[in-house]
Amino acid sequence: MKNKVETTIESLFRKTVRNDSKVKNAFLLVHSDKIDFHINLAEGKTGEIQSTPNQPNYMASVGKLFTSAIIGLLHEQGVLSFDDKISQHLDRALMDKLHVYKGKDYSYDIQIRHLLNQSSGLPDNFYPLFDKLLKDPGFTITPREAIIWAKQNVNPSAPPGKKAYYTDTNYHLLGLIVENVRGTPFHEALRELIFAPLGMNHSYMLHASEPIEDSGLPIAEFYADNIQVNELKGFAGIDYAGGGVVAPLEELLIFMKALVTGNLVSTDTLAIMKNDKAKLYPNFDYGYGIWQVKPIPLLIPVKFNSWGVLGATGAFMFYHPELETYLIGNFNHTSYQRKCVRFMFKVINSIWKYTK
Protein backbone atom coordinates (compact mmCIF):
# COMPACT_ATOMS: atom_id res chain seq x y z
CA MET A 1 0.00 0.00 0.00
CA LYS A 2 2.89 2.35 0.76
CA ASN A 3 4.24 1.73 -2.73
CA LYS A 4 0.86 2.70 -4.12
CA VAL A 5 0.83 6.11 -2.41
CA GLU A 6 4.42 6.70 -3.52
CA THR A 7 3.45 5.91 -7.13
CA THR A 8 0.39 8.15 -6.86
CA ILE A 9 2.38 11.14 -5.58
CA GLU A 10 5.20 10.70 -8.09
CA SER A 11 2.74 10.40 -10.96
CA LEU A 12 0.86 13.52 -9.81
CA PHE A 13 4.10 15.49 -9.54
CA ARG A 14 5.58 14.49 -12.89
CA LYS A 15 2.27 14.91 -14.72
CA THR A 16 1.81 18.40 -13.23
CA VAL A 17 5.25 19.52 -14.40
CA ARG A 18 5.17 17.89 -17.83
CA ASN A 19 1.75 19.34 -18.61
CA ASP A 20 2.83 22.93 -17.93
CA SER A 21 5.20 24.46 -20.48
CA LYS A 22 6.00 27.37 -18.12
CA VAL A 23 7.68 25.09 -15.59
CA LYS A 24 11.29 24.39 -16.58
CA ASN A 25 12.18 22.38 -13.48
CA ALA A 26 10.47 21.35 -10.25
CA PHE A 27 11.27 19.48 -7.05
CA LEU A 28 9.30 17.59 -4.42
CA LEU A 29 10.22 15.96 -1.12
CA VAL A 30 7.65 14.20 1.06
CA HIS A 31 8.69 12.63 4.34
CA SER A 32 6.37 10.93 6.82
CA ASP A 33 7.58 9.52 10.10
CA LYS A 34 4.13 8.05 10.71
CA ILE A 35 4.21 5.71 7.71
CA ASP A 36 8.01 5.52 7.30
CA PHE A 37 7.72 7.21 3.91
CA HIS A 38 10.32 9.29 2.03
CA ILE A 39 10.50 10.43 -1.58
CA ASN A 40 12.70 13.10 -3.16
CA LEU A 41 11.91 13.89 -6.79
CA ALA A 42 13.14 16.21 -9.52
CA GLU A 43 11.71 16.90 -12.96
CA GLY A 44 12.83 19.07 -15.87
CA LYS A 45 16.17 20.68 -16.62
CA THR A 46 18.54 23.37 -15.43
CA GLY A 47 19.81 24.70 -18.72
CA GLU A 48 20.70 21.54 -20.60
CA ILE A 49 21.35 19.53 -17.43
CA GLN A 50 18.74 17.10 -16.17
CA SER A 51 17.48 18.20 -12.77
CA THR A 52 18.48 16.07 -9.79
CA PRO A 53 16.88 15.85 -6.31
CA ASN A 54 20.03 17.16 -4.61
CA GLN A 55 20.18 20.47 -6.48
CA PRO A 56 20.01 23.66 -4.41
CA ASN A 57 16.74 25.54 -4.83
CA TYR A 58 16.05 29.21 -4.27
CA MET A 59 13.00 29.08 -1.98
CA ALA A 60 11.67 32.67 -2.17
CA SER A 61 9.60 33.66 0.89
CA VAL A 62 10.20 30.26 2.48
CA GLY A 63 13.26 32.15 3.74
CA LYS A 64 10.98 34.22 6.01
CA LEU A 65 10.73 31.24 8.35
CA PHE A 66 14.52 31.21 8.65
CA THR A 67 14.45 34.91 9.51
CA SER A 68 11.75 34.44 12.15
CA ALA A 69 13.68 31.47 13.59
CA ILE A 70 16.78 33.68 13.94
CA ILE A 71 14.70 36.31 15.74
CA GLY A 72 13.34 33.51 17.95
CA LEU A 73 16.88 32.43 18.84
CA LEU A 74 17.91 36.01 19.64
CA HIS A 75 14.76 36.32 21.77
CA GLU A 76 15.81 33.22 23.73
CA GLN A 77 19.34 34.60 24.15
CA GLY A 78 17.94 37.82 25.60
CA VAL A 79 19.50 39.91 22.84
CA LEU A 80 16.05 41.24 21.95
CA SER A 81 12.40 40.56 22.71
CA PHE A 82 9.43 39.96 20.44
CA ASP A 83 7.76 42.87 22.25
CA ASP A 84 10.61 45.32 21.68
CA LYS A 85 9.85 48.51 19.79
CA ILE A 86 11.82 48.30 16.56
CA SER A 87 13.17 51.80 17.28
CA GLN A 88 15.35 50.18 19.98
CA HIS A 89 17.33 48.42 17.27
CA LEU A 90 17.17 50.76 14.25
CA ASP A 91 18.67 54.20 13.68
CA ARG A 92 16.71 57.45 13.70
CA ALA A 93 17.25 58.17 10.00
CA LEU A 94 15.56 54.90 9.05
CA MET A 95 12.79 55.35 11.63
CA ASP A 96 11.97 58.91 10.56
CA LYS A 97 8.43 58.92 9.14
CA LEU A 98 8.64 55.18 8.53
CA HIS A 99 4.91 54.71 9.23
CA VAL A 100 2.65 57.72 8.71
CA TYR A 101 -1.00 56.70 8.34
CA LYS A 102 -3.77 59.24 7.74
CA GLY A 103 -1.54 62.02 9.01
CA LYS A 104 -0.49 60.28 12.24
CA ASP A 105 3.03 58.98 12.80
CA TYR A 106 3.01 55.41 14.16
CA SER A 107 6.69 54.72 13.47
CA TYR A 108 7.62 54.40 17.15
CA ASP A 109 4.66 52.15 17.97
CA ILE A 110 5.85 49.23 15.82
CA GLN A 111 7.04 46.17 17.75
CA ILE A 112 9.19 43.33 16.44
CA ARG A 113 6.16 41.02 16.75
CA HIS A 114 4.24 43.26 14.32
CA LEU A 115 6.94 42.73 11.70
CA LEU A 116 6.98 38.99 12.29
CA ASN A 117 3.23 38.40 11.91
CA GLN A 118 2.71 40.95 9.12
CA SER A 119 0.58 43.29 11.24
CA SER A 120 2.81 46.39 11.19
CA GLY A 121 0.61 48.10 8.60
CA LEU A 122 3.70 49.01 6.56
CA PRO A 123 3.45 48.90 2.75
CA ASP A 124 5.05 46.27 0.54
CA ASN A 125 8.24 47.12 -1.29
CA PHE A 126 8.91 43.80 -3.01
CA TYR A 127 6.56 43.73 -5.99
CA PRO A 128 6.99 47.38 -7.08
CA LEU A 129 10.77 46.99 -6.96
CA PHE A 130 10.64 43.55 -8.57
CA ASP A 131 8.73 45.07 -11.49
CA LYS A 132 11.49 47.68 -11.81
CA LEU A 133 14.08 44.90 -11.91
CA LEU A 134 12.22 42.92 -14.57
CA LYS A 135 12.03 46.04 -16.75
CA ASP A 136 15.64 46.98 -16.08
CA PRO A 137 17.89 43.94 -15.38
CA GLY A 138 20.68 46.29 -14.29
CA PHE A 139 18.59 47.79 -11.48
CA THR A 140 20.13 47.47 -8.01
CA ILE A 141 19.07 48.60 -4.56
CA THR A 142 20.18 47.78 -1.02
CA PRO A 143 17.71 46.47 1.59
CA ARG A 144 17.99 49.76 3.49
CA GLU A 145 17.30 51.73 0.31
CA ALA A 146 14.34 49.43 -0.41
CA ILE A 147 12.80 50.33 2.97
CA ILE A 148 13.37 54.05 2.38
CA TRP A 149 11.88 53.73 -1.11
CA ALA A 150 8.72 52.17 0.38
CA LYS A 151 8.20 54.88 2.99
CA GLN A 152 8.63 57.57 0.32
CA ASN A 153 6.53 55.97 -2.42
CA VAL A 154 3.85 53.68 -0.94
CA ASN A 155 1.25 54.31 1.77
CA PRO A 156 0.76 52.17 4.89
CA SER A 157 -2.44 50.11 5.13
CA ALA A 158 -3.29 50.45 8.86
CA PRO A 159 -1.91 51.37 12.29
CA PRO A 160 0.41 48.74 13.82
CA GLY A 161 -1.38 45.68 15.20
CA LYS A 162 -4.74 46.45 13.58
CA LYS A 163 -4.60 44.51 10.31
CA ALA A 164 -2.55 41.83 8.58
CA TYR A 165 -0.95 42.90 5.32
CA TYR A 166 1.77 40.77 3.73
CA THR A 167 4.85 42.83 3.00
CA ASP A 168 8.56 42.16 2.55
CA THR A 169 9.28 45.56 4.09
CA ASN A 170 8.64 43.93 7.48
CA TYR A 171 11.26 41.26 6.85
CA HIS A 172 13.79 43.71 5.43
CA LEU A 173 13.52 45.56 8.74
CA LEU A 174 13.95 42.29 10.66
CA GLY A 175 17.10 41.57 8.66
CA LEU A 176 18.55 44.96 9.56
CA ILE A 177 17.62 44.41 13.21
CA VAL A 178 19.53 41.10 13.16
CA GLU A 179 22.53 42.85 11.64
CA ASN A 180 22.44 45.67 14.18
CA VAL A 181 22.16 43.51 17.29
CA ARG A 182 24.77 40.99 16.10
CA GLY A 183 27.13 43.36 14.31
CA THR A 184 27.41 41.00 11.33
CA PRO A 185 25.77 40.73 7.89
CA PHE A 186 22.50 38.81 7.79
CA HIS A 187 23.95 35.99 5.69
CA GLU A 188 26.49 35.34 8.46
CA ALA A 189 23.66 35.04 10.99
CA LEU A 190 22.05 32.45 8.73
CA ARG A 191 25.24 30.45 8.58
CA GLU A 192 26.25 30.78 12.24
CA LEU A 193 22.82 30.27 13.83
CA ILE A 194 21.15 27.83 11.45
CA PHE A 195 23.18 26.36 8.58
CA ALA A 196 26.34 25.34 10.49
CA PRO A 197 24.66 24.04 13.70
CA LEU A 198 22.17 21.95 11.71
CA GLY A 199 24.71 20.64 9.21
CA MET A 200 23.06 22.41 6.28
CA ASN A 201 26.41 22.48 4.51
CA HIS A 202 25.12 23.10 1.00
CA SER A 203 22.78 25.97 1.90
CA TYR A 204 23.50 29.66 1.40
CA MET A 205 21.99 33.08 0.67
CA LEU A 206 21.44 34.06 -2.95
CA HIS A 207 24.10 36.47 -4.28
CA ALA A 208 25.34 37.08 -0.72
CA SER A 209 27.24 34.01 0.48
CA GLU A 210 28.64 30.62 -0.47
CA PRO A 211 27.75 27.22 1.03
CA ILE A 212 30.00 25.66 3.65
CA GLU A 213 30.65 22.88 1.13
CA ASP A 214 30.23 23.17 -2.63
CA SER A 215 27.91 20.44 -3.89
CA GLY A 216 29.10 20.92 -7.46
CA LEU A 217 25.47 21.19 -8.55
CA PRO A 218 23.98 24.31 -10.17
CA ILE A 219 21.15 26.23 -8.55
CA ALA A 220 17.81 25.31 -10.12
CA GLU A 221 16.77 28.16 -12.41
CA PHE A 222 13.65 30.09 -11.38
CA TYR A 223 11.48 32.25 -13.58
CA ALA A 224 9.02 35.13 -13.69
CA ASP A 225 7.20 34.77 -17.00
CA ASN A 226 10.09 33.96 -19.36
CA ILE A 227 12.74 35.86 -17.41
CA GLN A 228 15.34 33.82 -15.55
CA VAL A 229 15.51 35.72 -12.27
CA ASN A 230 18.41 34.01 -10.50
CA GLU A 231 20.88 35.64 -12.92
CA LEU A 232 19.78 39.16 -11.92
CA LYS A 233 22.23 40.37 -9.27
CA GLY A 234 19.90 43.20 -8.22
CA PHE A 235 17.43 40.63 -6.90
CA ALA A 236 19.49 40.18 -3.73
CA GLY A 237 18.68 43.65 -2.40
CA ILE A 238 14.97 43.21 -3.07
CA ASP A 239 14.75 39.74 -1.54
CA TYR A 240 17.22 39.80 1.39
CA ALA A 241 15.74 38.58 4.70
CA GLY A 242 12.32 38.22 3.10
CA GLY A 243 13.65 35.24 1.14
CA GLY A 244 17.12 34.59 -0.17
CA VAL A 245 17.66 31.08 1.21
CA VAL A 246 19.03 28.57 -1.31
CA ALA A 247 19.13 24.94 -0.21
CA PRO A 248 18.64 21.36 -1.37
CA LEU A 249 15.32 19.94 -0.22
CA GLU A 250 16.94 17.34 2.07
CA GLU A 251 18.54 20.18 4.04
CA LEU A 252 15.24 22.04 4.21
CA LEU A 253 13.84 18.86 5.78
CA ILE A 254 16.62 19.02 8.39
CA PHE A 255 15.57 22.60 9.21
CA MET A 256 11.87 21.78 9.50
CA LYS A 257 12.48 18.70 11.63
CA ALA A 258 14.66 20.74 13.98
CA LEU A 259 11.98 23.43 14.21
CA VAL A 260 9.12 20.98 14.82
CA THR A 261 10.99 18.94 17.44
CA GLY A 262 12.34 21.87 19.49
CA ASN A 263 15.93 21.39 18.35
CA LEU A 264 16.20 24.85 16.81
CA VAL A 265 14.11 27.17 18.95
CA SER A 266 12.43 25.79 22.07
CA THR A 267 8.93 24.37 21.90
CA ASP A 268 7.77 27.31 24.04
CA THR A 269 9.20 29.81 21.56
CA LEU A 270 7.69 27.92 18.63
CA ALA A 271 4.32 28.04 20.37
CA ILE A 272 4.58 31.84 20.57
CA MET A 273 5.61 31.98 16.91
CA LYS A 274 2.53 30.00 15.94
CA ASN A 275 -0.04 31.41 18.36
CA ASP A 276 0.70 35.15 18.05
CA LYS A 277 -0.95 35.22 14.65
CA ALA A 278 -2.96 37.54 12.44
CA LYS A 279 -5.81 36.76 10.04
CA LEU A 280 -4.06 37.11 6.69
CA TYR A 281 -6.58 35.50 4.31
CA PRO A 282 -9.87 33.63 4.80
CA ASN A 283 -8.02 30.31 4.59
CA PHE A 284 -4.74 31.28 6.27
CA ASP A 285 -3.58 32.79 9.55
CA TYR A 286 -0.04 34.11 9.77
CA GLY A 287 2.25 33.67 12.75
CA TYR A 288 5.93 34.57 12.88
CA GLY A 289 6.78 33.66 9.30
CA ILE A 290 4.32 30.78 9.59
CA TRP A 291 1.30 30.25 7.33
CA GLN A 292 -1.39 28.21 9.11
CA VAL A 293 -4.19 26.55 7.17
CA LYS A 294 -7.67 27.49 8.41
CA PRO A 295 -10.29 24.84 7.59
CA ILE A 296 -13.40 26.19 5.85
CA PRO A 297 -16.53 23.97 5.75
CA LEU A 298 -17.03 22.40 2.29
CA LEU A 299 -13.97 24.23 0.89
CA ILE A 300 -10.97 23.25 3.03
CA PRO A 301 -11.57 20.14 5.17
CA VAL A 302 -9.92 19.63 8.56
CA LYS A 303 -7.65 16.98 7.02
CA PHE A 304 -5.58 19.79 5.45
CA ASN A 305 -4.65 21.25 8.86
CA SER A 306 -0.96 22.05 8.50
CA TRP A 307 1.53 24.87 8.90
CA GLY A 308 4.62 26.12 7.16
CA VAL A 309 5.66 28.74 4.66
CA LEU A 310 5.07 29.62 1.01
CA GLY A 311 7.16 31.32 -1.66
CA ALA A 312 6.31 33.24 -4.83
CA THR A 313 8.14 30.74 -7.06
CA GLY A 314 5.67 28.01 -6.14
CA ALA A 315 7.85 26.99 -3.20
CA PHE A 316 6.37 25.44 -0.06
CA MET A 317 7.67 23.90 3.16
CA PHE A 318 4.92 22.55 5.44
CA TYR A 319 4.36 20.17 8.32
CA HIS A 320 1.15 18.19 8.83
CA PRO A 321 0.99 17.30 12.55
CA GLU A 322 -1.65 14.55 12.40
CA LEU A 323 0.06 12.77 9.53
CA GLU A 324 3.53 13.58 10.95
CA THR A 325 4.42 14.50 7.39
CA TYR A 326 6.75 17.11 5.89
CA LEU A 327 5.94 18.48 2.45
CA ILE A 328 8.64 20.50 0.68
CA GLY A 329 8.68 21.51 -2.96
CA ASN A 330 9.28 24.13 -5.60
CA PHE A 331 7.94 24.70 -9.11
CA ASN A 332 10.42 27.50 -9.77
CA HIS A 333 7.91 29.73 -11.57
CA THR A 334 5.88 32.64 -10.24
CA SER A 335 2.72 31.28 -11.89
CA TYR A 336 2.68 28.62 -9.14
CA GLN A 337 2.45 31.05 -6.24
CA ARG A 338 -1.09 29.83 -5.48
CA LYS A 339 -1.22 26.64 -7.53
CA CYS A 340 1.44 25.09 -5.33
CA VAL A 341 -1.03 25.10 -2.41
CA ARG A 342 -3.60 23.15 -4.40
CA PHE A 343 -0.90 20.70 -5.42
CA MET A 344 0.23 20.28 -1.81
CA PHE A 345 -3.35 19.58 -0.73
CA LYS A 346 -3.56 16.82 -3.36
CA VAL A 347 -0.44 15.23 -1.90
CA ILE A 348 -1.87 15.46 1.63
CA ASN A 349 -5.09 13.88 0.39
CA SER A 350 -3.17 10.94 -1.10
CA ILE A 351 -1.40 10.26 2.20
CA TRP A 352 -4.60 10.77 4.18
CA LYS A 353 -6.38 8.07 2.16
CA TYR A 354 -3.48 5.70 2.80
CA THR A 355 -3.37 6.27 6.57
CA LYS A 356 -7.14 6.32 7.12
Image (cartoon, helix red, strand yellow):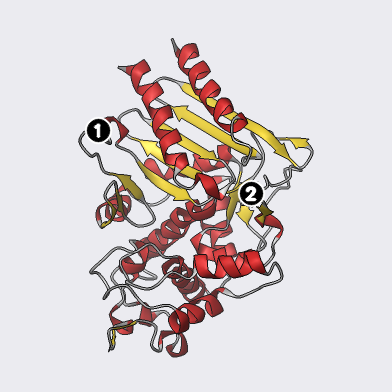
Q: Nearer the viewer, residue 38 or 178?
A: 38
Kindly identify which numbered label has been placed on residue 324: none
Residue 80 picture location, percent across and down: 37, 71
- Of the image marks 1 and 2, the number of the one nearer the N terminus: 2
Distance, label 1 to label 2, CA atoms, is 33 Å
Query: Viewed as shown, does residue 288 lie left or right of 244?
Result: left
Q: Residue at 38% across / 62% down in the picture?
A: 166
Residue 8 picture location, percent across and down: 49, 18
What residue is pinned by disc 1?
302
Q: Residue furthest left?
A: 297
Q: Nearer the viewer, residue 216 or 182?
A: 216
Looking at the rendered structure, the kind of residue marked 1 is: Val
Is the residue under label 2 in contact with that under label 1 (CB below 8 Å)?
no
Q: Residue at 34% across / 27% down in the picture?
A: 323
**Element type at marker 1?**
helix
Residue 211 visible to the viewer: no
Looking at the rendering, in which quadrant would you find the N terminus? Answer: top left
Compared to 189, does 24 lie above or below?
above
Looking at the rendered structure, the kind of residue marked 2 is: Phe
What residue is pinned by disc 2?
222
Q: Which image quarter: residue 18? A: top right
